[in-house]
Image (spheres, rainbow, N blue to C red):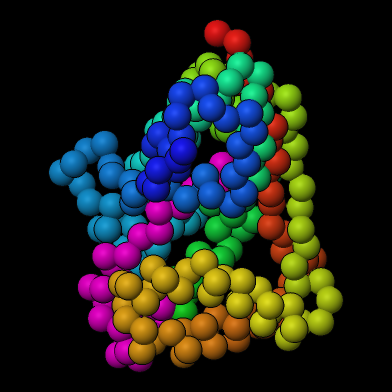
């Protein structure tokens, strides 16, 4: 019998699972990253941003990667204790094909959200301090980063790892933008409403839709969402 809790910890009895699947979970971090130098503040170094961006200092990028490494290693260790030898884990997570952690394929949704929130600050609808105190507990890794963590943790062999790209904004601009904005809302609304309040939601996501429409109207090729698909086999240690 399993118990409720975070998937980063133990959920099932030892050696009880033959197959585990996790789709669109492990790119969410257990917490907002902390900088190695505790005298510095992620909030100040990443001002007006809610995730890694091209303007983020190296310390911010490093903090996000280190938090993902720690969380994903903990996830693998917990699952290894729950699984029988040669049991399988099937994972799908959002990632990136670029080596650059600030590339558009992994940061676009957060750049758009940050831009919409910044507009609402300039309109006096959100306090600037409230925006500055908001960072997203999320990381889109490359295949190489995922493989490195799996190998270092050591409990699993990789049976399959591949990535695929989904084009967005390549058909009807308005319908694609609306669909993408609704997708963003589906997984960001709970944390946005918790941090900023429910009263801003409709206007915020209307702004996001309009920003995406403007972007799609000028792009020369479709934006992409990258998925990483992984099949792991529990080693018989």
Residue occupying image coordinates x 69% and y 57%:
225
127 and 229: which one is in front? 229
Q: In which quadrant of the rendered image does the C terminus lie?
A: top right
197 and 22: which one is in front? 22
- Measuring from the top left, give residue 26's x and y in whole percent: 52, 45
Question: Against 118, is 39 above or below?
Answer: above
Residue ranking furthest to the front: 1
- Measuring from the top left, give residue 143's x and y in whole percent: 64, 35
Q: Give yes or no for residue 139 being in the magenta stretch.
A: yes
State the image quarter where residue 142 is shown.
top right
Residue ranking furthest to the top: 237
**Residue 218 appears in the figure:** no
Provide the residue span drawn in magenta. 117-141
Residue occupying image coordinates x 25% and y 58%:
44
Question: Against 48, is 78 above or below?
Answer: above
Question: Against 43, is 74 above or below?
Answer: above
**Residue 36 appears in the figure:** yes
Residue occupying image coordinates x 59% and y 44%:
22
Q: Is residue 221 left or right of residue 198?
A: right
Q: Is residue 10 left or right of residue 36?
A: right
- Measuring from the top left, give residue 161's x and y in whole percent: 72, 33
Question: Against 152, is 136 above or below?
Answer: below
Residue ranking furthest to the right: 171
State the image quarter where residue 235 is shown.
top right
Q: Give yes or no for residue 18 being in the magenta stretch.
A: no
């Amino acid at each position: 019998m399993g118990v409720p809790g975070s998937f980063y910890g133990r959920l099932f009895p030892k050696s009880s699972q033959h197959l585990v699947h996790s789709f669109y979970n492990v790119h969410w971090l257990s917490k907002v990253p902390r900088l190695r130098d505790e005298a510095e503040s992620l909030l100040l170094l990443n001002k007006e941003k809610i995730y890694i961006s091209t303007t983020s200092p190296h310390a911010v990028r490093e903090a996000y990667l280190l938090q993902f490494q720690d969380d994903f290693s903990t996830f693998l260790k917990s699952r290894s204790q729950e699984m029988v030898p040669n049991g399988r884990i099937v994972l799908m997570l959002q990632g990136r094909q670029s080596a650059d952690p600030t590339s558009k394929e992994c940061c676009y949704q957060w750049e758009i959200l940050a831009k919409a929130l910044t507009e609402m600050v300039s309109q006096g609808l959100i306090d600037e301090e409230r925006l500055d105190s908001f960072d997203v507990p999320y990381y889109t890794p490359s295949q190489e980063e995922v493989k490195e963590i799996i190998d270092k943790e050591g409990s699993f062999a990789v049976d399959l790892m591949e990535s695929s790209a989904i084009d967005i904004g390549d058909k009807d601009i308005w319908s694609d933008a609306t669909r993408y904005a609704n997708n963003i809302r589906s997984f960001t609304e709970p944390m946005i409403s918790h941090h900023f309040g429910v009263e801003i939601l409709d206007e915020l996501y209307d702004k996001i839709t309009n920003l995406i429409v403007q972007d799609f109207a000028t792009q020369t090729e479709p934006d992409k969402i990258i998925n990483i698909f992984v099949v792991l086999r529990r080693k018989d240690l």
